[in-house]
Image (cartoon, rainbow, N blue to C red):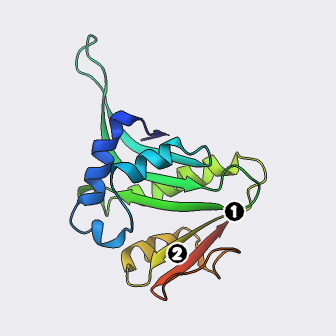
Amino acid sequence: MLLRETGPEDLEGVIGLEEAEGTCDWLGATGREWHETALADPDQWHLVFVKAHPAHDDNEEDEEELVGFVVLAGLSKPGPVEMRRMVISAVQRGKGYGRQLLGEVFKLIDDVPDRDRIWLDVSHDNERAMALYESVGFEPCEPPEGVRPGTERLVFMDYEL
């Protein structure tokens, strides 16, 4: 498994993951423009999580299977990092990839100076996501300073690094 920067060539697959039944219901704004904005913003990291499939022939390139992606924000200044979005392919759910992706995110952010925690918001009725986040150490918290909840349906969670 590999966590790498998202390229423009990855966007169709990323958007496809978002549009899948059982995923789109949990997301706010989506679509190509949302992702292009995230890719262009130096304060955000847009990363894809891929599984490599070795080529059968030395003349062929290895193939990658898109398993999921994550978008992180708040990277231009010290303090907490926001996990804006995390999606695992509907066909890959339940196989431990979400937990594995979060582990890679924790390692990545832990290497960035002046980072003390990661926070996110999740719909209060997205039980599957909340269970995953809690299982790796996220805990409910108050909204970060300057963040207005917008709805009572959101649960804020954070993870101390």
Badges 2 and 1: C-beta atoms under 8 Å apart? Answer: no
Look at label 1 and name its amino acid.
Answer: Pro
The count of marks equals 2
Q: Residue at x 69, y 51 (%)?
A: 110
Q: Is residue 68 visible?
A: no
Looking at the rendered structure, which numbered label has been put on residue 80? Answer: 1
Residue 4 vertical placement versus 160 (above, below): above
The image quadrant of residue 136 is bottom right
Q: Residue at x 77, y 48 (%)?
A: 113
Query: Where does the C terminus fall, quadrant-wise?
Result: bottom right
**Given this view, does label 2 or label 1 mark the residue nearer the observer?**
1
Residue 64 x/y as whole percent: 31, 34
The one of 50 and 21 positioned closer to us in this rendering: 21
Q: Secondary structure at mark 2?
A: helix
For the view shown, which residue lies furthest in the bottom direction? Answer: 152
Which numbered disc flags the more N-terminal residue, 2 or 1? 1
Q: Is residue 80 left or right of residue 3?
A: right
Label 2 packing within 10 angstroms: few (<14), some (14-19), many (20+): some
The one of 46 and 52 positioned closer to us in this rendering: 46
Residue 50 x/y as whole percent: 37, 41
Residue 122 vertical placement versus 88 (above, below): below
Label 1 packing within 10 angstroms: few (<14), some (14-19), many (20+): many
Look at label 2 and name its amino acid.
Answer: Glu
**Residue bearing the label numbered 2:** 134
Query: Where does the N terminus fall, quadrant-wise?
Result: top left
The image quadrant of residue 65 is top left
Q: Secondary structure at mark 1?
A: loop
Q: Residue at x 70, y 45 (%)?
A: 111
For the view shown, which residue lies furthest in the top direction? Answer: 59
Residue 27 x/y as whole percent: 37, 68
Residue 60 x/y as whole percent: 26, 16
Between the residue at mark 2 and the residue at mark 1, the CA separation in whole angstroms equals 18 Å
